[in-house]
Image (cartoon, rainbow, N blue to C red):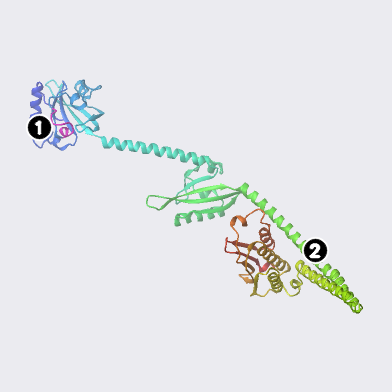
Amino acid sequence: MGSQVAKPVETMAVSNEITRLLSKGGEGFAGICRAVTDHMSVIAKNHDILWVNDVAKCYFGRDLVGKKCHAAYHGAYQPCSPCIVESAFADAGVHEHETVVVVANGNKLNFLCTASPVIFDEDGRPMAVIEISRDITRQKKMERERTLASESLQKKERLTRAMLEATTDAVVLLDPDGIIVESNLEYACRFNRTREDMIGCVIWDLFPGPIAEKRKANVDSVFETGRPTTMLDERDGMWNYTNLHPVFDSSEKVSHVAVFAHDITDLKRIGDKLEQSRERLRNLSDYIETARERERTRIAREIHDDLGQVLTAVKIDVAWIKKRLGLDAGAEKKALGIMDLVDNAIRSVQRITSELRPPLLNDIGLGAALEWQVNDFAKRMGIRAEFKKNCDDHGLGEKTSVTLFRICQESLTNIARHSRASGAWVRLSKKKGATVLEIRDNGIGMSHETMTRDDAFGLMGIRERALTAGGTAEIKSTSGKGTRVVVRIPCTVS
């Protein structure tokens, strides 16, 4: 470590030489001893400690000189194996090792120990070795923490990789330039490539122009706004539902965008077939409803024409007979009774024919038919009911008129049967290019479970009628707060 001292000396002579070296003040060996923060000790060939610096005294106590180094530093009776002090004496070289030592305060500390000859005899053989020990406890702790962190990170990476490969979604991670920095095997397979081939590619180069532009616009939007988004697109017959999620760095800026592409081709085909099936069912339902309305019209006409005429004729004949009964009070009373029965029958015929097909619907329009329906409901059920119309109902097609009339009829029937309401309100209007029918009551309402039951055929019928007519039906109800039905049919349908 310093210049060689070539004098034949024994242990005492070595101690004197150390004293001489230290007496040089701020230069050389003494200056080094004061400057370093490592603990230093000079050790004789017999392992006696000849000198220690102040740092060593802080670690191991002041009474060190004269003790064996293995006893003072390791609490051992014999030198360590291997012993760097013995190795330094043996080959006059520099040796080092790491060790754990219990210091004066009882703490276990890690030291990196270096042994090197410092004083030589006249033949150049080492007479004393200096051992410099550096406290590396904090460094070792940091290394252990780094190792644990690295192992934890590797474990997380393995788990993440396993998750990426386990999902059936195609997953890719993009930087702001659209360069793929990570990809799972599924994504690579969709382009007939390996995962390694995908890394570093510009993703827009993998798609046809229009699709690339659409995807780039969505990815750029996520980088700019920091908000996730979704998109649906088709490529080569494959439909993908894609989720784009921002990945933030430590400064809360979007550093990457994670892309999750879910193949919904089979679901799309099933959905298309299901929608086609529903459309056919709606067409069938529309056909059945149209046929039913025609049949109702035919039956109403026949009842009105045939039965109505017969009852009118019966009434005329009974009146003729009554005039010829003379003074027979009993027979006259009986004739009056028969005439009352005939009148009731005529009224029943009128009511039945009106319910089957209100003549007002064809004669003067939907508004008048709804007003008659509401008034008849109030009269028969004893429930206060109001009808308001703030639009011109001329020009409504037969299909729209019949649909709205039947929905109102079904809604009023539901109010009478289930609502326990004291009032009902019906309004016909036009809003935003649609004919709107609103029916509400102040009854007990319905729970969500009741409204969605499989046997709620009345509510299902209202919705299906509206859909068949090209419109929508919104039914809202809260327990204890009544029910509201709003039907909207675009005017273009009419």
Q: Please, what secondary structure does the residue beneath circle 2 have?
A: helix
The residue under label 2 is 295
Which range is magenta?
55-64
Report whether 149 appears left or right of 357: left
Q: Amino acid at mark 2?
A: Glu
57 part of magenta stretch: yes
Q: Give the number of marks.
A: 2
Q: Judge whether 297 appears above or below 211 on screen.
A: below
Q: Position of residue 422 (x, y in %)?
A: 62, 68
- Side (left or right) of 301 relative to 401: right
Q: Nearer the viewer, mark 1 or mark 2?
A: 2
Q: Nearer the viewer, residue 286 or 438?
A: 438
- Describe residue 359's horizontal placement relative to residue 321 as left or right: left
198 relative to 417, above or below: above
What residue is disc 1 on?
A: 22
**Residue 308 figure quarter:** bottom right
In the rendered structure, the answer to whether residue 137 lies left or right of residue 346 reads left
The one of 28 and 281 positioned closer to us in this rendering: 281
Q: Quadrant of the C terminus?
A: bottom right
What's the residue type where badge 1 is placed? Leu
Q: Main secondary structure of the magenta part?
A: helix
